[in-house]
Amino acid sequence: MRKWYHLLNEEFSGILKPLLVICLFNTAGQLLLVKIRARDFEALISRFENLYISSGSVILFTICLLAVVGLFVIAFYRHYWGSKSIYTLMTLPVSRSKIYLAMFVSNCLGLMLFYLLNFVTVFLSYCLYVSELNNFSSGKAYIMNNGLFLGLVRSDVFRIIFPLTLNGQLFLAIAFLLIPAAVLFSVISERGLRYSNLILSGISIFLIVVGISQGIASTVTTLVNVLMTILLVLLVAISIRLVNKNSIS
Amino acid sequence: MARFIKKHGVTAVLLINIILLAILMLWLQNSLKAATFDLEDLFGQRDELNGICITGSLHDAGHSLEFTLEDGKITTYTTIYDSYSDYLDQIREYPYIWSLSDNKNTDILASISSRISNSAETLVQEKEIATGEFTSFGEEIVVKKTVTYANEVDYYCYVRLFDGLFETALFKTGISRKSDRKEFMFEDESHCVKTENELIPIYASQGVASAYNHRVYPKVVKAGGKYFVTITTNEFCSGSGGIYRIDEFERYDYERDRFGRVTKTVDVDLKGGKVEVIGLEAVSDKLLLLLKDNNRLVLRLHDTDGSLLDEIKPDIPEIRGDGEYGNSYMCFVNGNNAHIVINSESKIVADDFSIVSLSIGDRIELNHILKDFRTNGGRNQAFLAVESVNEKLVVINGVYEVGVKAEDIYMHAPEIQINIFDRSGELKYQGKILTDMKDDYMVPDNSYSIREWHTYPRRSLDILTISGSDNQKLTGVE
């Protein structure tokens, strides 16, 4: 366990700095976008969710999310560059499945940090929106009691990013486990020259997109949740098998 | 620091994640309770609410604040909808909302059409229009347009089950309208093949016209497992109306002018427009027919076979006007209780109303009569619920600000009031429910698209149940 913990820290330290840079960029960028959008009085007196979405913050969040996924890919391939640390990894006195799990847990933690800091960003954006409204004498009338909560439950974009229902949160939790699993599965399959495996990664993306398009609720999403869970278990199991088979070295 | 992060970075980030997650959960819990929902006393003692339990929902498409006001104490609970369909399911279950609709049964569609009466005087104008099209034999296809002007029309009622395209019925109502001039226009269009001597029709439309602007509307209710229809009439209608029972639906047949089996169980002589049918309500498998006889409200109770059980003429001010789209009153039906809210000009939104509260058994029992129920300052009001509990009449209404016109109420948040009257009609208590609804109307509202539905993110308040302290729920299901 101690060795695995050490390995996990080693893996995580590789992505932490760039991850924090992405998070910082995401936060600063969103606040800047909201600030710029708030210059338009008509946009400012519309509801927070309208202002936030029309500011381009959701697009920035999506770009940063893709950057985080890209970071996971780079973090994996970095083992093959320079000192080729993958060979060191493979010779460590821990089971290979633990090496995989260290990578997987490290990515999950990173994604979770990015997501939670994004919530902090939205909260800060809301504070900025309120302070901008307070700058106008008539602006106070447009501040809604419990406005952030209302925005989150009313806007379908926010309902996808920050679901507040059990079903939605379940979908998001599975999706946030499936994304790192699919990324690792894809790169491991590529290293093992098993390109046909990429179909499973494609199915993962498809299921996440279907789940989002269904508004994170409905019987379809329950089915999607079940399929995503099955796929998650499958991807992790196949990935461990491939790692054990020496596919990545 | 760098060394610490390298050694324990995971633990640190995990801790940060847990803290952020905890903050997020705390914020959510706090937000769920942050909405304003309180009761402010305007008149009388809150003790008057003892023994009364009101439940309801302040909701929009995304969430609902469910509340219970029992013995004057409020408890609230917020639920967040998974999807917009949850919201739709909830309002579908809500019994009162359909009271405003022409059609009280959501599973049936009904409409009125007019046809030229046999006894009508007519004027016919014909016109031939070239289409520029030809048959394969080279014969020209023309459109023959026939416009008939008539001075008398008969009204027909068409009903169809919402889920059964072929489950239809069409019947002649017996109600007609006669005019001094030939004002009713019917357009027939025939596509004909033009030969040397004649026009051979290949397709023709029937001489039927919508009666939408005639202010004649169907009202459908369900009692004893059967659908019953009445047609609301106006001062121009003659003949006889009443209650029609649909015994059998049939497949639609455009070649026949009647189909389905319909029995007229109650016949009402309209006396040349002096008597008007204004509505029909189903109350515990009995039918309450609402009429206006020389502008006085008449309530007739019939059983499903059409037998007259009772008739009363409540002592309320005269009623004039036709209402909007056939709705000249609101009726709140809860089990055996029926409460009719009516304005002297047949408006649904106005200042002064009369409320007639009834219990329906084998006869009509009059519980309360409120005359001239007005707001302070002549403001417009609309009604959310009326119920009789422990000899008290509970009236929940939405009162709009001074100057808000009836047609503009949907752009303004109402002040929700709870009024309690004793049996003599004296106001014992008036309270105001404080909510954040007004915020939704202050901020410009872009319609939200949730899948194929468009909704405005505004909260509205629905009263779901009003019951007594014995907890015998009067759910209001008709």
Image (cartoon, rainbow, N blue to C red):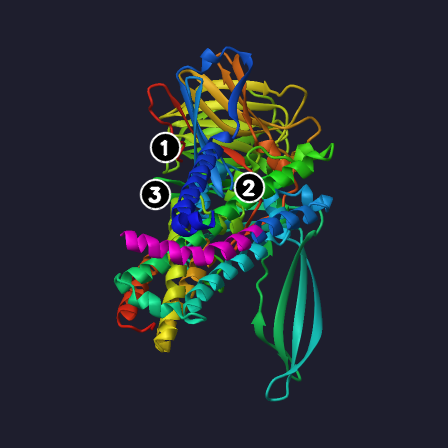
**Depth check, front residue: B233 or A172:** A172
| Magenta part, dominant SS | helix
Residue displayed at 70% across by 51% down: B183
Instruction: Tell me the residue that label 3 is attached to.
Output: B225
* Residue A2: image location, x then y, percent: 28, 51
Specify the subunit that label 3 lies on. B
The answer to whether marks 2 and 3 mark residues whose Cβ atoms lie closer than 8 Å is: no
Q: CA distance from mark 3 to mark 1?
A: 11 Å
Residue B419 bears which disc, if any?
none
**Depth check, front residue: A47 or B236:** A47
Give the foreground label among 2 and 3. 2
Residue A20 on the magenta segment: yes
Magenta stretch in the rendered image? A1-24
Instruction: Tell me the residue that label 2 is attached to.
Output: A123
Q: Is residue B268 visible?
A: yes
Kind of element beneath mark 3 = loop
Give the foreground label among 2 and 1. 2
Instruction: Tell me the residue that label 1 is attached to.
Output: B284
For badge 2, the amino acid type reads Phe
Residue displayed at 64% across by 85% down: B139
For badge 1, the amino acid type reads Ser
Kind of element beneath mark 2 = helix
* Crowdedness near tag 2: few (<14), some (14–19) or many (≥20) residues, C-alpha within 10 Å: few
* Crowdedness near tag 3: few (<14), some (14–19) or many (≥20) residues, C-alpha within 10 Å: few
Q: Is residue A107 visible?
A: no
